[in-house]
Amino acid sequence: MMANAGVPLLVTGLLSYFSPYDVTLAEIAAAYLLTWLPWASYRTWYRDERKGIPLFALLAGMYWLSYVLPLFWGSHAVSLVSGRRPLSDKAITASLYLAVAGVVALWAGIKLAARFRWVPLVRVDVCTTPGHWNLLRIIFIVGTLVKVFVPITEWGEGGRQFIADFEKMVPTVIFVIFLRYYLRQRISNLDKALMLLYVFVAVVVGISSGWLGSFVGLGIVCVIIYTYERRKLPLTAALIVLPIILFFQPAKQAFRERYWTGNSAGGYSERVAFWGESSWNMWAEAITDRTGYRSMQLADATLSRLSLLQQTANVMEFTPDRVPYQYGRLYSYVGVTLIPRFLWPNKPSVNDANQWYQVSYGLTLPRELSNVSIAVGTLAESYINFGWLGPVLIMFPLGIFLGSLQRILLHADSGLLFSSVGAVLVPQLLAVESQMAQYVAGLAQQVLVVLLALVPVLKSQGQGRAVPARMVARRVNQSRILRPNTSLQKPPM
């Protein structure tokens, strides 16, 4: 009990003590709750059998990054088209209360989903005979080459979405399968080389494109797989990766201004070198500046990429006095996400809700929407639609959806293929800064693309059926699929 309460209290106290801002007692209390929720959930998972993924702890941790850290170290102002505007303490406090309500509603939904009496028992998995494994390698190589050489902009609306889903999902799922065999020490040197090649490609292509998301997403996927196989979170690896993210984060805007807005040409190596050199110079200036001003600027630039506090506070001040409640209008796209764009080329864009938000709340001029994309997050979007009822009407059902997805794709009885697909989807599930349409858009399509691409290497183990959850738990106890010393068939060396 003391560990559950003491660690969040210590962390919140240290952040408050070293904060350059005057934080109220109410804000500190809300920050403590947002720190306690993920920590207590993680402790509960750690004391248990740890057969699944602590999804709620990870989600709540993302809300901690988005609201608590910016409270103590981020700027309490928001950049609008009219200039930089300071935010009131009342709006910041209300935003923290909304975050607490949203995370609690999410927890309640996930807990309710865990009590459902059935889960689908999937009977399709990857076949590891020599011929099928060689096909898996070929698909992996093709998917990696598509990521490097196939531009998604030349395939039309429908084709672009398919290519994007293919290059994002298919090679990553196969990489995950290889990684799991690697952790079990059942993989050939050829497959190790293919894994290293994919990591190199994913990092270089991502950074040279101006996105840290590919690097971060791949890191999250590796953490999930390690948790599958070792039943513990690799905190040491996370502590190594975090400084790399923080190093590159401040220079992201300079990179995009040069290679996106400025349309400057340059190969992969030149772009990576520019980003690295720019980040190094910014950090060097901050370290040598004795006034501390550059350090504050750098901290604000870094946290602003993670923060939802300023955007949410701006929403609280604008709604409903200047922008009326939308009563669900922003969720209109969610209903058409299951329809592929090649069947409906002119269907509404997933960015419509984002663009409406940017213009209505004074963040972006209409003529600049093609160059700027700003999301307010699922939680604040629920307030835009339904006010303080938003967490109940939106976050609670979202928790049920995520809890159901966790039972289907993130538990031991899912099998090698589907649990690997679930692991690849986790970075998308942790993107709490996305609005609802973008958050859930395409999940079913992404899974379908993976299944279609891997049809040549799949095998059927019988007829799938729904089984009671208590039977799943019994089978998980007997199953060795996710244990370190598993007896899975060894792939060809």
Image: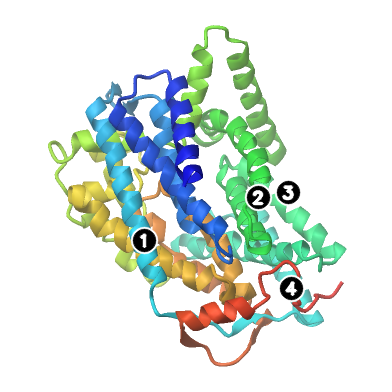
Q: Position of residue 128 (x, y in %)?
A: 75, 79
Marks 3/2 in contact by CB < 8 Å: the verdict is no
Spatial separation of the CA atoms under disc 3 and disc 2: 21 Å
4 or 1: tag closer to the N-terminus: 1
Spatial separation of the CA atoms under disc 1 and disc 3: 35 Å
Check disc 2 and report the residue beneath it. 234
Is 455 rendered above or below residue 442?
below
Identify the element where label 1 is drawn.
Answer: helix
1 or 2: tag closer to the N-terminus: 2
1 or 3: tag closer to the N-terminus: 3
Spatial separation of the CA atoms under disc 1 and disc 2: 25 Å
Spatial separation of the CA atoms under disc 4 and disc 1: 32 Å
Q: Which residue is drawn at 62% across and 25% down?
A: 278
Check disc 4 and report the residue beneath it. 486
Check disc 3 and report the residue beneath it. 200
Identify the element where label 2 is drawn.
Answer: loop
Mark 2 surroundings: few (<14), some (14-19) or many (≥20) residues within 10 A: some
Q: In the rendered image, which quarter is residue 342 located in?
A: bottom left
Q: Which of 220 and 456 is in front in this view?
A: 220
Report the amino acid beneath label 2: Pro
Q: In the rendered image, which quarter is residue 224 located in?
A: bottom right
Q: Residue at x 58, y 85 (%)?
A: 123
Report the amino acid beneath label 3: Phe
Marks 4/2 in contact by CB < 8 Å: the verdict is no
Is 84 rendered above or below residue 212?
above
